[in-house]
Image (cartoon, rainbow, N blue to C red):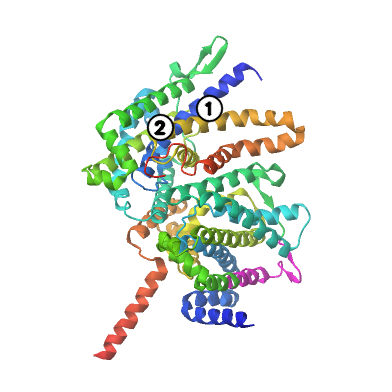
């Protein structure tokens, strides 16, 4: 177990973490500010990934694919809110679960009809397909590094937007007390549509960046959706800061745990027990973390004020 | 003795009040006669699947419909119940009654732990935490290589004393018997002091608390009971499928259970079983329908089913039970007005 391996895994965890944050950032606001249970957020990830991959394959340029896919995901989120979601705000949570569950089925099937059930592949540009030395003698895939940088830039932009702008203040007010915010003259309808479309865009960006790393296929967003729900539970609903910290923690714990837990267990138990329990514990680690945090902080690490 | 008489009284009056449930249950009891005459044995299989999902949905309905707790993780209890059968058989225990006992115990304990942790929260938190715990259990079974891991394990039909499940229709009537039992039990619970309090908590928790009761206790007990009912359904599911894999507790199944309940009618006794009939018939016949209309898209039936769910939410009120009641009311109303005029 060398320093190289540890460093590499920490970077992988960071990359998984920022990707998770991009999905969770929008979702935590949709859940917290809009009080809307939106399960089809994974579909937005898928739409982003497919848009980028399809455009990249058509034009032959990765960056054009990304640049054109971003407005596409924004439009898809905007349209979805306008056509379906806004009719569901006043419904109870159970009906929202049901309707957005229906949307998942619809989007997965629509993609399957449009692009076929097989995974879609696209090539990376030469500048991103090589390795970069993060430390002397420690090579790391350039694309993963690029994902970390883009993810952190997005996180910074989201953070500044939420903490420094007027609309951001409305968001925070909405997360703490939606009725009061509306009574004070915040245009809730416009705010909701903005949150929704922006959330869809960032989820789409996460999909675009995951595409070259994993398979672009129908249903690809669901595992990410579930993990980002765990992130939101840990971070506290409605808190973008909480989502960021929790996403990095979850990304690191999940990635590093899978690699090192089996060998760590071998220090304490015999080989057979460790090899049996290792993978089991590793895949549950994130959820165990969630359970432990819930015991001490039932509303997450950074609950929006007024919701405790 | 007086207690037994009282319970019998509750059952009697409950049967009169829940005619729809008992009509459907009786229908399932007589269904094999139909399939035998019409020579459609495949339909028995479908009916068993409907009853199994119906039982699980009835269990979930106790917390979802009567208690107002939106649990998004009940598939995990079906899975635990099913794995209790699989794991018992792995160690050579073939007695079906024992499997059921294990399933009830395991689901009761798991339900208690999850319930204690999750019920401290409500609303969106509760939905997501129950989902989180279900995922945790899902991954636990995925990684248990001894018990088949991802691929699952095959199972023999359990031995229920003198009832040989390999005889035709024995399993069918075992499942039907459990359906009757669960139906009676839920009917008694819902009409009991406990059930009434539970429903009061759903509509106004603070008020129940002000009356000196502890809502958490009621919620927890109902949560554990519903987990056990789902575990029971899961144990039978394993015998029916003769196979169990983590797929049985995939999070989409929790969604399916919720769909079944809302489709049928939330917080009604007959709702879950009627919802299960409609859901599984749609699942069975939408592909067939598409095959005749648009053969190229026969496999893509979800493109219709998905929007259908959205439409049910947007325009359906009170599910199918509500719809049937409205139709009955209208028929009664029109005949009454005709009588007057």
- Which chain is indicated by disc 1? A
Judged from the image, the secondary structure of the residue bearing numbered disc 2 is helix
Assess disc 2: are there few (<14), some (14-19) or many (≥20) residues with their C-alpha within 10 Å of its C-alpha. Answer: many
- Locate residue B179, reporting x and y percent: 58, 70
Assess disc 1: are there few (<14), some (14-19) or many (≥20) residues with their C-alpha within 10 Å of its C-alpha. Answer: many
Query: Which of the two residues, A291 or B135, is positioned nearer the viewer here?
Result: A291
Is B171 included in the stretch rendered in magenta?
A: yes
Residue A266 in which image quadrant: top right
- In the rendered structure, find residue A116 and report the number of the disc placed on it: none
Q: CA distance from mark 1 to mark 2?
A: 18 Å
Query: What's the magenta region?
Result: B157-180
Q: Is residue A50 visible?
A: no
Kindly identify which residue carries mark 1: A13
Residue B317's place in the image compared with A38, above or below, is: below
Query: Which of the two residues, B9 or B327, is positioned nearer the viewer here?
Result: B9
Q: Are marks 1 and 2 in contact (CB under 8 Å)?
A: no
Residue furthest to the right: B92
Residue A60's place in the image compared with A254, above or below, is: above
Quadrant in which the C terminus of chain A appears: top left
Q: Residue at x 62, y 62 (%)?
A: B232
- Locate residue B3, reporting x and y percent: 61, 79
- Which chain is indicated by disc 2? A
Residue B83's place in the image compared with A232, above or below, is: below
Position of B154 with respect to B336 (left or right) is: right
Position of B170 with respect to B216 (left or right) is: right
Q: Is residue A164 visible?
A: yes
Q: Residue at x 62, y 68 (%)?
A: B175
- Locate residue B245, reporting x and y percent: 63, 50
Kindly identify which residue carries mark 2: A241
Is B191 included in the stretch rendered in magenta?
A: no
């Amino acid at each position: 177990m060398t320093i190289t391996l540890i460093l590499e895994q920490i970077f992988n965890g960071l990359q998984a973490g920022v990707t998770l944050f991009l999905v969770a950032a929008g979702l935590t606001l949709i859940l917290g500010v809009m009080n809307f249970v939106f399960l089809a957020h994974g579909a937005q990830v898928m739409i982003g990934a497919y848009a980028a991959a399809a455009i990249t394959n058509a034009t032959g340029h990765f960056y054009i694919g990304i640049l054109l896919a971003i407005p596409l995901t924004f439009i898809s989120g905007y349209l979805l809110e306008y056509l379906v979601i806004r009719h569901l705000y006043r419904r109870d949570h159970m009906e929202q679960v049901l309707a957005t569950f229906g949307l998942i089925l619809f989007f997965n099937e629509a993609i399957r009809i449009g692009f076929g059930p097989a995974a879609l592949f696209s090539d990376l540009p030469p500048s991103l397909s090589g390795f970069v030395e993060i430390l002397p003698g420690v090579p790391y895939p350039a694309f993963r590094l690029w994902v970390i940088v883009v993810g952190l830039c997005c996180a910074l932009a989201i953070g500044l937007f939420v903490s420094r702008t007027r609309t951001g203040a409305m968001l925070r007010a909405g997360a703490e007390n939606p009725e009061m915010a509306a009574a004070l003259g915040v245009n809730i309808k416009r705010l909701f549509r903005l949150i929704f479309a922006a959330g869809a865009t960032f989820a789409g960006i996460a999909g675009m960046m995951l595409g070259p790393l994993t398979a672009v296929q129908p249903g690809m967003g669901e595992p990410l959706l579930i993990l980002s729900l765990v992130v939101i539970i840990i971070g506290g609903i409605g808190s973008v800061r909480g989502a960021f910290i929790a996403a990095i923690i979850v990304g690191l714990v999940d990635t590093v745990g899978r690699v090192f837990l089996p060998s760590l267990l071998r220090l304490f138990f015999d080989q057979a027990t460790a090899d049996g329990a290792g993978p089991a514990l590793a895949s549950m680690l994130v959820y165990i973390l969630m359970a432990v945090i819930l015991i001490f902080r039932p509303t997450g690490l950074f609950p929006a004020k007024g919701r405790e | 003795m007086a207690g037994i008489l009282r319970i019998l009284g509750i059952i009697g009056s409950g049967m009169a009040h829940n005619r729809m449930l008992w009509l459907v249950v009786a229908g399932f009891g007589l269904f094999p006669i139909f399939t035998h005459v019409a020579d459609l044995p495949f339909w028995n299989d479908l009916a068993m699947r409907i009853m199994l999902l119906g039982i699980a949905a009835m269990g979930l309905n106790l917390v979802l419909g009567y208690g107002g707790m939106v649990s998004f993780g009940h598939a995990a209890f079906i899975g635990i119940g099913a794995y209790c059968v699989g794991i018992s058989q792995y160690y050579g225990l073939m007695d079906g009654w024992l499997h059921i006992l294990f399933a009830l115990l395991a689901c009761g304990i798991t339900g208690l732990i999850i319930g204690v942790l999750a019920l401290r929260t409500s609303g969106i938190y509760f939905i997501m935490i129950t989902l989180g715990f279900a995922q945790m259990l899902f991954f636990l079974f995925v990684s248990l290589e001894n018990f088949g891991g991802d691929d699952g394990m095959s199972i023999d039909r359990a031995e229920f004393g003198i009832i040989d499940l390999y005889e035709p229709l024995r399993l069918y009537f075992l499942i039907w018997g459990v359906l009757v039992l669960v139906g009676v039990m839920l009917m008694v619970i819902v009409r009991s002091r406990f059930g009434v309090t539970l429903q009061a908590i759903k509509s106004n928790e603070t008020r129940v608390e002000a009356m000196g009761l502890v809502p958490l206790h009621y919620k927890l007990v109902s949560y554990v009971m519903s987990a056990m009912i789902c575990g029971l359904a899961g144990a039978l599911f394993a015998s029916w499928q003769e196979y169990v894999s983590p797929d049985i507790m995939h999070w989409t199944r929790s969604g399916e259970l919720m769909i079944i309940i809302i489709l049928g009618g939330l917080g009604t006794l007959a709702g879950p079983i009627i919802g299960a009939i409609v859901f599984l018939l749609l699942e069975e016949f939408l592909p067939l329908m598409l095959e005749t209309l648009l053969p190229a898209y026969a496999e893509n039936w979800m493109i219709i089913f998905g929007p259908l769910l959205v439409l049910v939410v947007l325009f359906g009120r009170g599910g199918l039970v509500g719809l049937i009641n409205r139709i009955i009311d209208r028929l009664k109303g029109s005949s009454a007005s005709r009588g007057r005029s």
